[in-house]
Image (spheres, coloured by chain):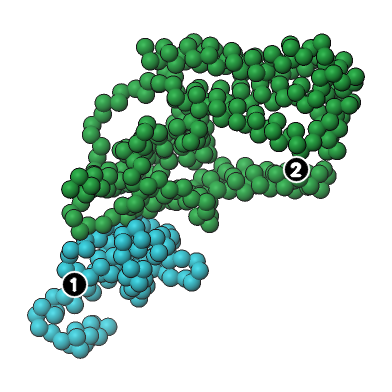
Chain colours: A green, B cyan
Amino acid sequence: MKEKTSRTVLGLFIPVPVAAIGLVPYLAYRSDLPDRIASHFGFSGRADGSMAPEVFLAVFGGLMAVGLAGCVTVALIRRRLQPMVAPSVSSVGAFLGSISAGILAIGQRGLEQWQDATISPGTLVPWVGGSLIVAGLAAWVASSLPFDEGSKTEAPPAAMELAPGERVFWSATLSARWPLVLGLAILLVGLVLLLITELWIGLVMLGISILMSFFGRIRVTADQSGLVVRYGFLGWPRRSIPIRRIASVRAVDIRPTEWGGWGYRGSLAIMRRAAVVLRAGPGIRLDLRGGKVFAVTIDDPDDPVRLLNAEISRLATLETG
Amino acid sequence: MLWKIDTQSSQPLHEQLAGQVRRGIATQALVEGEKLPPAREIASGLGVNMHTVLRAFQTLRDEGLLEVRRGRGTSVAANAQPVTRHVELARSLVAEARRAGLEDREILKLVEVQL
C-alpha cells in the first residue's frame, strides 16, 4: 500500500508539475515571444544564440520528456523502489523544467527580436538560484515518500559490553583511486581551458578537481561523542554526527546504485538521506532520530557499529538515571 | 583500529594505551607504515589528557615500534611486527626477574652476559 502510494507520486504527481513548470510558460507566452527564442547568452549579458520555437520546444521538452519518462518507467517497472531514486529524479527534472522556463521569463515577452534579450547578474542569480530551490523542494517532497526498505525486523543492534570506567575510540581510513584520477583529468582539462578560454571556466574546473580530491581519502572516527567523517588528505572538511542524533547503527553492504552513485550522495537536510560512497562494499549505516539515514563506506564496520550502539545505550541509561 | 582504556583500572593510562598499540601491531590490526590518528584526537575521543597519549607514543618510539615525525604524524615503524615480540619478551623478563627479587642493575647484567 505504502509502496503503491510512492509509485503513484513518482509516476504522476512529480512528472506533471515538473512538466507544468517547464512548458506552461512557453505555451502561455507563445504569441508574445520573438520569432526565435534567445537560448544562449554571452559574457556581456547579451543574447548570442537562438533557437526556433519548435527547436526550443523539442530540446527542452525532449529533455524533460526523457526525465519524466524515466520517472514513469521507474515507477512502473522497478521491482523494489530505491529510496534515493525519487528525490534524485524529481530534483533533476524540476531543475531542468525551471531553468528552461526561466529562459522565457528573462524578458523575452514582447521583444521584437531575440537579439534584444539581455541577462544580468540581477536576473541570473534569481533564475539559477530559484531553479535550485525548486529542485531542492522537489527532492524534499519526494524524499518524504514511504519506501519499502526490505526486511526491517533484524536482530537487535550489536553492541559491545562497556564497564562504567571504560572508554573507547575507533579510527579507520579508506582510500579510493577513482576520485584522484578523475580529479587530475578535470584539472588538466581546466588548465587547458584556462589558457584558451575565459578564466572563470578554468577556475570552476580547478574547484571541481579540489572537490574530487576530498573523496580520494576519508578518515572515520567513532567515540562517545558520535561519528566524524574527515574528507581528503588534510582531514578537512569534516562532517560530524553527534551521538544524540543517532538512534541505531548497523553494518551494511553499500551498493552505489542504492545510494545514488559515488561520492557524497543525497543530503540530510533536503533528501533525509545521505551517503559517503567511495566504493561498493561494507559500510556503516546510522539511522538518525526522526527517520533520517546517513551511511559511510568503511572496511570492517563491526567495531564502530558495536561501539556506537554501546555509547547510545550508555547515554540512554545515563539520562534515565 | 579500536582503542579501549579503563579509567578504573590500576594500570596507568599511558601504559594501557601503549599496550593497545603493541597488541595492534602484534595482531596486525596496525600494519607497518600505517599512520596513527593524531594524539589530540585519540585524547579527546577517550577523554584523556593529550600528554598521556604523547607519553605512550614516546615509550613506543623508544621501543622501536613507532616513528614520530614532527608535523608528519606518528606511524608504525618498519619491521615493528618482529620487534613487538622482543619487546614483549623483554617486558616479561623484567617482570619475572623483579618478582624473583632481582635489582634493576642485576637484570641489566643478566642481559649483558647474553650479548
Please give left or right for residue A11 compared with residue B106 in the image: right
Task: Tell me, yes or no, if residue B55 can be seen here.
Answer: yes
State whether residue B51 is above or below residue A158. Answer: below
User: Which secondary structure lies at badge 2?
Assistant: helix
In the image, A217 versus B93, the foreground residue is A217
Please give left or right for residue B47 compared with residue B106 in the image: right
Q: Have a look at marks 2 and 1 and say if they share a chain.
A: no
Q: Residue at x 72, y 25 (%)?
A: A102
Tag 1: amino acid: Ser
Quarter of the rendering containing residue B43: bottom left
Q: Chain of mark 1?
A: B
State whether residue A235 is above or below residue B103. Answer: above
Q: Chain of mark 2?
A: A
In the image, A120 versus B114, the foreground residue is A120
Instruction: Name the spot of residue A157 as percent of width and height, x first.
Output: 25, 37
State whether residue A116 is above or below residue A248. Answer: above
Residue lying farthest left? B100
Q: Residue at x 34, y 41 (%)?
A: A246
Q: Label 2 crowding class (10 Å Cα cut-off): few <14, some 14-19, many 20+?
A: some
Q: Label 1 crowding class (10 Å Cα cut-off): few <14, some 14-19, many 20+?
A: few
Instruction: Name the spot of residue B83 as percent of width and height, x first.
Output: 32, 68
Task: Tell me, yes or no, if residue A192 can be seen here.
Answer: no
User: Which secondary structure lies at badge 1?
Assistant: helix
State whether residue A234 is above or below residue B68. Answer: above
**Which numbered dot is residue A201?**
2
In the image, B20 versus A224, the foreground residue is A224
Tag 2: amino acid: Ile
Which residue is tagged 1? B92
